[in-house]
Amino acid sequence: SEKCKARGFTVIVDGRKSQWNVVKTVVLMLQNVVPAEVSLVCVVKPDEFWDKKVTHFCFWKEKDRLGFEVILVSANKLTRYIEPCQLTEDFGGTLTYDHMDWLNKRLVFEKFTKESTSLLDELALINNGSDKGTQQEKERSIDLNFLPSVDPETVLQTGHELLSELQQRRFNGSDGGVSWSPMDDELLAQPQVMKLLDSLREQYTRYQEVCRQRSKRTQLEEIQQKVMQVVNWLEGPGSEQLRTQWGIGDSIRASQALQQKHEEIESQHSEWFAVYVELNQQIAALLNAGDEEDLVELKALQQQLSDVCYRQASQLEFRQNLLQAALEFHSVAQDLSQQLDGLLGMLCVDVAPADGASIQQTLKLLEEKLKSVDLGLQGLREKGQSLLDQISNQASWAYGKDVTIENKENVDHIQGVMEDMQLRKQRCEDMVDVRRLKMLQMVQLFKCEEDAAQAVEWLSELLDALLKTHIRLGDDAQETKVLLEKHRKFVDVAQSTYDYGRQLLQATVVLCQSLRCTSRSSGDTLPRLNRVWKQFTITSEERVHRLETAVAFHSSAEKV
């Protein structure tokens, strides 16, 4: 205590097991270190005498120079100078004292005091640096002295353990559990330790808040940096990639190549979209934490990031849909072109059917193909119009870029394909009309030939009937006249049949001239028709002559 310190300390130097030189060194050390605070030094001498060198150094003669009195005394006579309650059992006293325990506590106390004091200074410097100055100065001061030289948690734990040791009332090292009262310095150390612990807790709490704020600021800055990286890439290289991709291709293969290129662009974007998802989750977590001062900045970052990502994703989707529509358009155009080629090939082959049925079958096939072409052209127009509508909306994604030239090329290509298909279809329709007329004429030709052949058959049948059944001449003039009248009517029928056959054969000649083909009927059917008709005419004349003769005969007979 200060009171004891004012009276001066009595120091016992136990020299019973030490050399004189050691004792002398200790005394001189006291003179060098704490001369003003020592009033008496009792050197406990051994039971045996030291050598004569002791007599050469008389401490009592050096009192003025040393600043305190030094006496040599036996252990059993220490009670003359010091109260027994202040002496340990080693020196014949009653004081319960374990020097190693006290020393260990003292070392821990001094270490704790030193570390805690140093730590308090460091924490105060850090905390005070974060409370004043500009934001830049705060960050600089925190960066320079942010980590204390010792771990605050360790120092606090050491302090709590030390305080617990100081506050306990029993001596840890005594075998018999003898009660003892703490030393005065231990009693004085308790409030000092408590005060240091309170200060440490206060400064450490502030330090933790500084760390939390710095961690939050660092996290916010990292998020902001990543957000700007995503935004800068999407608005820079990402948008530039899309700006250079405006074509739709002029064929299926070209459109597929553009789709493959677009998939590569989408793959690069997907990596940045993954970063966007992660950042959005981090921002949402910070927003849920509820720090009012950062809400506005976080929401602004989140909104900026979302706007850019959604806009870029919309452009990618629009481009993908456009390329898909272009691929479908070119696919329909290719199918239609193949149909037109097939129809044209069919029309270019000369028709040589064997009969009217095959002509009807061929004509039906032509009509079906033409109908399929009509449906294909209608589908092409629908796909083309849909593609044109999408292209007309493409300018809204151009970021101010004039896409008139690019769009005009695409529009011209689409319209050119549709016009070309329309012209090809029209040419095929014209050729189908010609082929239809030709086929109908051929059907008519076959019909005329068939009917002409039928007329020959009918005329042959009439001739046969004339030869086999028209033989009666009648029993009287009246009956003969009736037979003659019937014969004339029979001849009229044959004449009509012959005329019908002639007309049909003349029609075949005209049709053959129109079709530019050689008639198969004029060299066969016409001679047969003429031959049968000639036979019929001769036979008919003979029949008429016989009937007229019979009439004359019966008339003469009746007169007679």
Image (tube, rainbow, N blue to C red):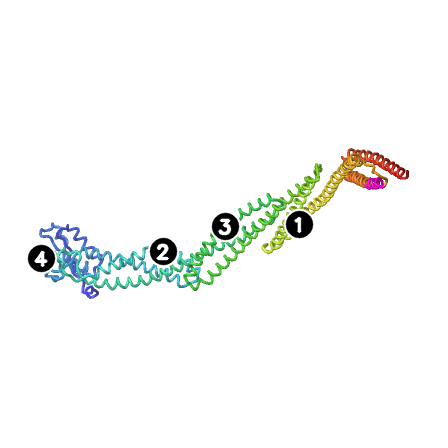
Residue ID for mark 4 = 76
- State how far apart marks 4 and 1 are (Cα): 128 Å
Q: Quadrant of residue 348?
A: top right
| SS under mark 4 | helix
Q: Amino acid at mark 3?
A: Ser
**Can you give x and y, in whole percent of width and height, for residue 84 in the image?**
11, 61
Circle 1: residue type: Gln
Q: Which mark is residue 270?
A: 3
In front: label 2 or label 1: 1
Give the Cα separation between the discs numbered 3 and 4.
93 Å
Q: Closer to the N terminus: mark 1 or mark 3?
A: 3
Query: Is label 1 in a helix, a strand or a loop?
Result: helix
The stretch of residues the image draws in magenta is 478-489
Q: CA distance from mark 2 to mark 1?
A: 72 Å
Q: Earlier in the sequence, mark 4 or mark 1?
A: 4
Q: Secondary structure at mark 3?
A: helix
Q: Nearer the viewer, mark 4 or mark 2?
A: 2
Q: Quadrant of residue 26?
A: bottom left
Q: Amino acid at mark 2?
A: Leu
Q: Earlier in the sequence, mark 2 or mark 3?
A: 2
The residue to which callout 2 is attached is 147
- Specify whether residue 12 is in view: yes
Q: Nearer the viewer, residue 249 or 353?
A: 353
**Residue behind mark 1:** 415
The three-letter code of the residue at mark 4 reads Asn
